[in-house]
Image (tube, rainbow, N blue to C red):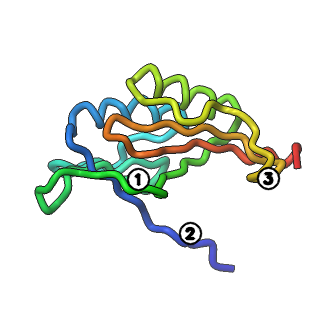
Amino acid sequence: MNITPCLSHVSLGTNNFDDAARFYDRVLAALGCRRVMEHPGAIGYGRDYPEFWLQIPIDGKPAGTANGVHIGFFATSKKQVDEFYQQAVAAGAREDGAPGSRPHYGAAYYGCFVRDLDGHKIEASFWDESAA
């Protein structure tokens, strides 16, 4: 059976690399993620390999956000979702959906949403199968 994930990685651009790097160092640590690869102007985060990249846009133009686009990170517990949210808000994120259940996503869903320092929408979610 092939267990290769569908996605290799996702990338978000930033207009203030150093501040964004400090933000993601702090926020992703709440989920057990860390810097696993670095290049000038780019950091790859993950648990084992770089699944999420933070970078200065390669074309040199300002980074922007897209309506309807967001990045979702897996949490391994409700506590991790809560910690992700608390760390993000403390690091300057804008609240966009406090931690909690959202039955319209499924009985097992527990998650939160914030806007990072560049305005990108990011989410942490835990799927509690015992609640399904």
Q: Residue 94 versus residue 128: which sits nearer the camera? A: 94
Pointer 2 or 1: first along the chain: 2
Left/right placement of residue 65 relative to residue 28 reads left
* Percent x, y of residue 13: 28, 51
Residue annotated with mark 2: 5
Distance, label 3 to label 2, CA atoms, is 22 Å
Asked if 119 appears above or below 72 in the picture, the reply is above
* Percent x, y of residue 106: 79, 53
Q: Amino acid at mark 1?
A: Phe
Residue furthest bottom in the image: 1
Q: Quadrant of residue 2?
A: bottom right
Mark 3 or 2: in front is 3
Q: Secondary structure at mark 3?
A: loop
Residue annotated with mark 1: 52
Q: Residue 26 versus residue 119: which sits nearer the camera? A: 119
**Disc 2 to disc 1: CB gap under 8 Å:** no
Residue annotated with mark 3: 106
Q: Secondary structure at mark 1?
A: strand
Distance, label 1 to label 3, CA atoms, is 25 Å
* Percent x, y of residue 3: 63, 72
Q: Amino acid at mark 3?
A: Gly
Q: Quadrant of residue 91?
A: top left
* Percent x, y of residue 113: 55, 39
Dividing the image into 4 quarters, which one contains the N terminus?
bottom right
Asked if 87 appears above or below 11 in the picture, the reply is above
Q: Quadrant of residue 115?
A: top left
